[in-house]
């Protein structure tokens, strides 16, 4: 036995054998420009996911999700990355929805072999939305002439400074329908026959409280994460949390003034909007 092995042996012998579950926090709106500690993107969560799945002696990885959604591409990439790491490490994945796991937030939750939600959580919203404004009358009133030159007949589709064309509206609605179908296929692939509710309700774009989500098959269990982990791994289970690393002090101040503050407001507004519809 080497000197190093001899010195560390007592600690291994008398050290803790408590089971470990790693919890990685995934919080905020989803968008390509998100950075660690400020919203969710494939880039911003990469380090946290790798740490969670590479932790030694971990029995499982929990994705603690609190997101109203956002960019579908980034949501799918995060989900796919978590699934890839799960396959690579052979660790079971549990998705836990805290306040809200809606739209893209729910898509990320599909990375788990099972989905658990807090009793007050909002889940679902399996749909796609696009919104904008038309300013053509406004620029006429203030006497502004807009000049646009293109080399393609459809290069300026959905220009907010021009009257909406029926063909443009149909084009956008077609893309939304295709995106919705991709989302539905992902849910069916991951949830399978656990989806028990009627498709016209489950995939309507509506959102639900956790218990209703369970009845529809969107989630598997409703409850408190810590208590559920204790019931599965014992009362002495050690829960290790991993949060996205934020920037230094100056970076934090800058983020609070700029996009960090915007992200916080967006997250609050999205959550408040969902809750206001429920009268909560």
Image (cartoon, rainbow, N blue to C red):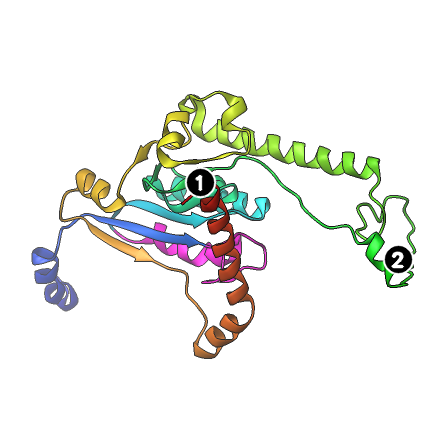
| Quarter occupied by the C terminus | top left
The picture places residue 184, in percent across and down from the top left corner, at 55, 30
Q: Is residue 76 visible?
A: yes
Instruction: Identify which residue, 107 or 46, lies in the foreground.
Output: 107
Q: Classify residue 248 by image quadrant.
A: bottom left
Instruction: Identify which residue, 139 or 111, lies in the foreground.
Output: 139
Q: Residue at x 36, y 48 (%)?
A: 64
Q: Is residue 80 above or below residue 145?
A: above
The picture places residue 159, in percent across and down from the top left corner, at 81, 50
Q: Classify residue 33 by image quadrant.
A: bottom right
Give whichever of discs 1 and 2 has the lower sequence position: 2
The picture places residue 99, in percent across and down from the top left corner, at 39, 47
Q: CA distance from mark 1 to mark 2?
A: 40 Å
Q: Residue at x 13, y 51 (%)?
A: 17
Q: Is residue 84 visible?
A: no
Tell me the crowding category of disc 2: few under 14, some 14 to 19, or many 20 or more residues within 10 angstroms, Cα based: few
Asked if disc 1 and disc 2 are in contact, CB closer than 8 Å, the reply is no
Residue range highlighted in magenta: 28-56
Q: Is residue 122 above or below residue 18?
A: above
Q: Residue at x 27, y 44 (%)?
A: 225
> What kind of element bears circle 2?
helix
Q: Is residue 231 magenta?
A: no
Residue to which mark 2 is pinned = 140
- Residue 250 horizontal side relative to residue 171, left or right: left
Instruction: Identify which residue, 91 or 31, lies in the foreground.
Output: 31
Q: Residue at x 42, y 52 (%)?
A: 26
- Residue 19 horizontal side relative to residue 69, left or right: left
Tell me the crowding category of disc 1: few under 14, some 14 to 19, or many 20 or more residues within 10 angstroms, Cα based: few
| Quarter occupied by the N terminus | bottom left
Residue to which mark 1 is pinned = 278
Q: Is residue 47 magenta?
A: yes
């Amino acid at each position: 036995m080497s000197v190093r092995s001899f010195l560390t042996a007592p600690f291994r012998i008398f050290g803790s054998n408590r089971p470990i579950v790693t919890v990685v926090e995934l919080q905020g709106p989803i968008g390509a420009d998100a950075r660690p500690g400020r919203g969710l993107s494939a880039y911003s969560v990469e380090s946290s996911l790798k740490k969670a799945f590479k932790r030694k002696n971990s029995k499982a990885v929990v994705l603690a999700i609190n997101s109203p959604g956002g960019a579908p591409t980034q949501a799918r990439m995060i989900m796919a990355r978590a699934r890839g790491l799960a396959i690579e490490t052979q660790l079971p994945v549990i998705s836990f929805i805290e306040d809200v796991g809606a739209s893209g937030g729910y898509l990320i939750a599909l990375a788990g072999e099972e989905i658990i939600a807090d009793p007050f959580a909002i889940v679902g919203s399996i749909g796609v939305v696009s919104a904008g404004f038309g300013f053509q009358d406004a620029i006429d009133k203030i006497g502004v002439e807009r000049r646009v030159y293109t080399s393609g007949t459809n290069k300026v589709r959905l220009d907010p400074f021009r009257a909406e064309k029926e063909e443009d509206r149909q084009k956008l609605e077609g893309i939304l329908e295709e995106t919705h179908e991709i989302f539905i296929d992902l849910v069916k692939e991951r949830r399978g026959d656990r989806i028990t509710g009627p498709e016209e309700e489950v995939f309507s774009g509506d959102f639900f409280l956790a218990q209703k989500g369970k009845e529809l098959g969107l989630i598997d269990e409703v409850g408190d994460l810590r208590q559920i982990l204790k019931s599965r791994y014992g009362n002495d289970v050690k829960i290790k949390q991993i949060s996205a690393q934020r920037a230094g002090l100056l970076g934090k101040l800058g983020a609070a003034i700029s996009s960090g503050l915007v992200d916080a407001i967006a997250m609050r507004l999205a959550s408040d909007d969902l809750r206001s519809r429920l009268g909560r």
